[in-house]
Amino acid sequence: MTKKIIKILAVLSTLIIILCIYLVVFGLETTRFNSLINKEVKNQNNRLSIDLKKVKLHLNLKNFSLKIKTNDPILIIDKDKKILLKEISSNIKITSYFQNKFLLSKITIITSDNEIKKYLDLYSLFERTPQVILLNQFVKKGNLKFKANINFNKNGKIKDNYQIEGEAKNIDFNILKFQKIKNLNFNFDIKKNIYNFKEIFLNFEGVKFTSDNISVSKEKKNFMVKGSLNNKTHKINHKFAKLIEDLNFEKFDLIDKNFNSNTNFTFIINEKFKISNFNYTSEVNINELILNYENKLIKNFFIDYDKSIKFKNNKFIISNLDDKLNVKGKGEYLIKDNNIDFFNFEIVKKKDRYNYNISIDLTNQKLQIEDLEYIKDSKIKSSLELIGRLKENQIELESVIFREKKNFINLKNLDIKNNKILNIDNIDIDLSANNKFRNQLVLKRKNKNFFLDAKSLNFEVLINKMSKNDKSRNLFSIFDDLNSKIEINIAKANLDSESEIKNISGFVEIKKNKIFNVNLNSSFSDKEKIFLKVKTNSDNSVITNFSSDRAKPFVKKYKFIKGFDGGNIDFSSSRIGSITKSKLIIDNFKVQEVPILAKILTLASLQGIADLLTGEGIRFTDFEMIYSKKGKVTTIDEIYSIGPAISIMMDGYIEEEKLVSLRGTLVPATTINRTISSIPLIGDILVGKKVGEGVFGVSFKIKGNPKNLKTTVNPIKTLTPRFITRTLENIKKN
């Protein structure tokens, strides 16, 4: 009996061993566990089910468990959304079955390619978070496949040591309202709180980018993202350029320009996809940029500038660390073909403040500074350096240095806002003016006032502007609100190529950008003095007095007078509100060409005097002009001029750039003498007893547009009492 039992046990043992070996080596196919597996799946979420085919069992003797494997199962969400799987395998501890515990210890899932939207739906069954909802909105399409190894604890909860690896293809999603990423492809490896993305390829607004690795690590409720992003040489299209233009680069022509980049970055993203602590370093190379920018200031400095600057071989290093943006750049620029120069710069931004250091080679550029009559031709070594700051549209230039051989400009602490100067501490200039004269000056600020010390200055441009009634003649209009006193000491200054004044001293007081008081003295020589005085009274009336023992430098600039010589000048004016009343006196001068006067003489058949005017010139002993101005209208109360050959009296008005309306009387000097001699008693005393044969003169009118004046003349037999009176006054004076 005992032997039989032993035999039976031996057989059973042998059978068990064979069965175990078979289960270990070959396994067993069955459907008995399908319901059990489906039950466990539903235990995870009742909206989830699984469609299984035959299940194959393998025995694992090491940990006394069964490995359950099924091929091509289908995971079903809400009975209609199917996720195709390649394989599901799991381990069931045999002891757990007898102990009525959770059976699964490990599960491995290998999927087929499925739409990524379906995985998001699956994930939302377990975690219905706002970020999942947002991600579902961002993602438009794409496929995903993966292999997941998941371990369970004895209570059926997933352990932290899970691992998911897989591949994503052709994903499209929106990162902003108008910007899209297309054809995103990558491999991934996910562990608890660590996400690694490798071999990344994407298309952003038509530009292809790659990345070797991007890692994401979870820290509390945030995610730390670290990685790189690169692109090979690629042309910038309209969409990508629009993105850059939105960053206020709208003046740059970027279309069809080649560029490449290499960027390393880190940032933190929270559960609501809000990005913070965005740090990056990017190297960008752009073969060509064109700046389309119509700027009067640039045009005034660069002679060849025509609304655009071309930048070539540009290399930029852009970094943002701890909210501090740093941009370094270098390259070449062209204002005109074949005049290539170099530039480099560094810009540092922190909060709303920009610090910059710019160096520009100007060797091959033609330059000019009109007000200083400075001109530089190409092929002359020169440079410009700018160090400063930009804050809230205010430019603060700590230093501006221009160098060219012996010429230089050095500005310190120049603050500009809305193209107006807010402050300047120091100006140091040493520049040649047309290679004939040098501007050598130092302007220093002390508190609110300035001190101008100059060896030499060129005043010719300023005088030309004044003679043309140029609105830009107010040098102080470039300031925002200047209220200062300028102490002046100038050794010498040229008025033109022929005239030089010396020892200019005095002061100019400015209030609200306007000249308030002036007191300046100078001289042409020991015997020829010049002074200017402007005084603003308590009633805001402005009194101006100007006197020069040499009139020629100030008169010859006017186009309607040519061949002016000699004379001295005395000018006074009074301005109250918008009305200015002035008086101009010039004595003892000669003119050679006055077109209007020549025409009057010709029409009056005074050819002899006309020939004299265009020959050696006509001399005048006295010229006096009394006039007033309001707005654009100048009213001439009287112009009176007397000379050995002719005398003139005139009045009328001039509306700037619109209308000239003048009338007057012209009388040969011999006629005047005879007229005065005919006056009883007075004529005998002043002129003599000889009486002329009658009075002769010409009345004339000048009228029309300044560019198309019409002149008419009429002989007269009787001189006006005013003409005679003014003549008598002149005779008495002389």
Image (tube, helix red, strand yellow):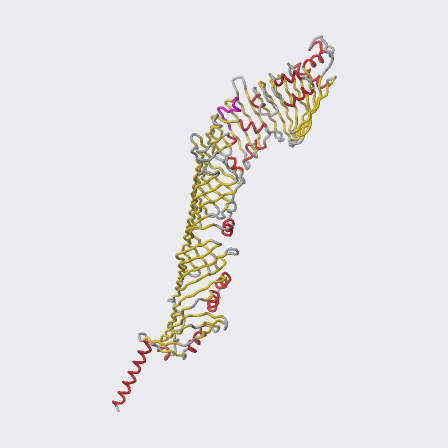
Q: Closest to the observer: 14 or 260? A: 260
Q: Position of residue 200 (x, y in %)?
A: 42, 58
Q: Where does the magenta region start and end?
A: 487-499
**Magenta includes 329?**
no
Residue 615 location, quadrant: top right
In front of the other: 97 or 519: 97
Instruction: Return the residue nearer the eye: 611 or 104.
Output: 611
Look at the picture and state if 361 lies above or below 23: above
Kindly identify the residue that appears in the image at 66 percent across and 25 percent down.
627
Residue 414, position as x, y percentages in the image? 49, 37
Number of marks: 0
Q: Main secondary structure of the magenta part?
A: strand
Judged left or right of residue 20, residue 635 is: right
Above or below, 673 relative to 314: above
Q: Quadrant of the C terminus?
A: top right
The quadrant in which the N terminus is found is: bottom left
For the point 74% across and 13% down, the residue is 694
